[in-house]
Image: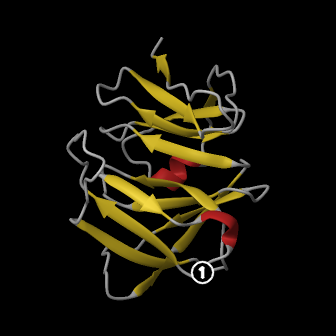
Amino acid sequence: MRFLSDTNYAKRENINVIILDEPVYCDSADTVLTDYKSFQFQYPDGARDAETIMVDPLTSTLFILSKREENIRIYEAPATLTQSTVMELTFKESLPFHNVTSGDITIDGKEVLLKCYDSIYYWNRAVHETIPEVLASQHEILNYTPEPQGESIAWSASNDGFYTVSEKRGTGDQILYFFERN
């Protein structure tokens, strides 16, 4: 399942999150995706710049993390998503991070990563913890050499490590980095 969002620059009163099944690879440039759902959300405390969307695989709860505040904010979507109305997100927690650009949760829900421009943070989740509780708890800082505008992180499907990649800048090639588990 993939999520697309238009949450940058804190300019929109409402944000859209589009949920779609993982597309089947096709080498045609003319592939059109038509099977998706679009949901509108509103922050309870005004527009935010946000790039991190995560879904807890244990509860199917959607979380959005703000990006630019000195202490970012984590918001939770309603348990039942409706396409016909603007839903209000619930503020859950302020976290002592800045410039969070992405995050991911392992398929089994036991591990969480957050990526900032210059750091990657890691949590091992206890069975009873919610995602806001996990992110407010003690974390590890992983070894990472920052990429130019490195803004993406994802666990591998086999859970043997994670990937990072930068947004394309200038004429240089984008490099997909893989960090294998120790």
- The residue closer to the viewer here, 68 or 181, is 68
Q: Which picture quadrant has residue 17?
A: bottom left
Q: Residue at x 31, y 49 (%)?
A: 57
Query: Of all residues shown, which one is farthest toward the bottom?
Result: 85
Rendered image coloring scheme: secondary structure
Q: Is residue 121 left or right of residue 26?
A: right
Callout 1 amino acid: Pro
Q: Residue at x 23, y 66 (%)?
A: 34
Q: Is residue 68 left or right of residue 90?
A: right
x, y percent for residue 180: 45, 15
- The residue closer to the viewer here, 114 or 167, is 167
Image vertical order of residue 140 relative to residue 83, above or below? above
Count of numbered circles on the image: 1
Dot 1: few (<14), some (14–19), or many (≥20) neighbours within 10 Å? few
Query: Of all residues shown, which one is farthest toward the right?
Result: 70
Q: Residue at x 24, y 54 (%)?
A: 21
Q: Which picture quadrant has residue 93?
A: bottom right
x, y percent for residue 134: 52, 46
x, y percent for residue 47: 66, 76
Residue marked by disc 1: 44
Q: Residue at x 25, y 44 (%)?
A: 28
x, y percent for residue 162: 45, 27
Image vertical order of residue 85 relative to residue 59, above or below? below
Q: Secondary structure at mark 1?
A: loop
Image vertical order of residue 114 relative to residue 6, above or below? above
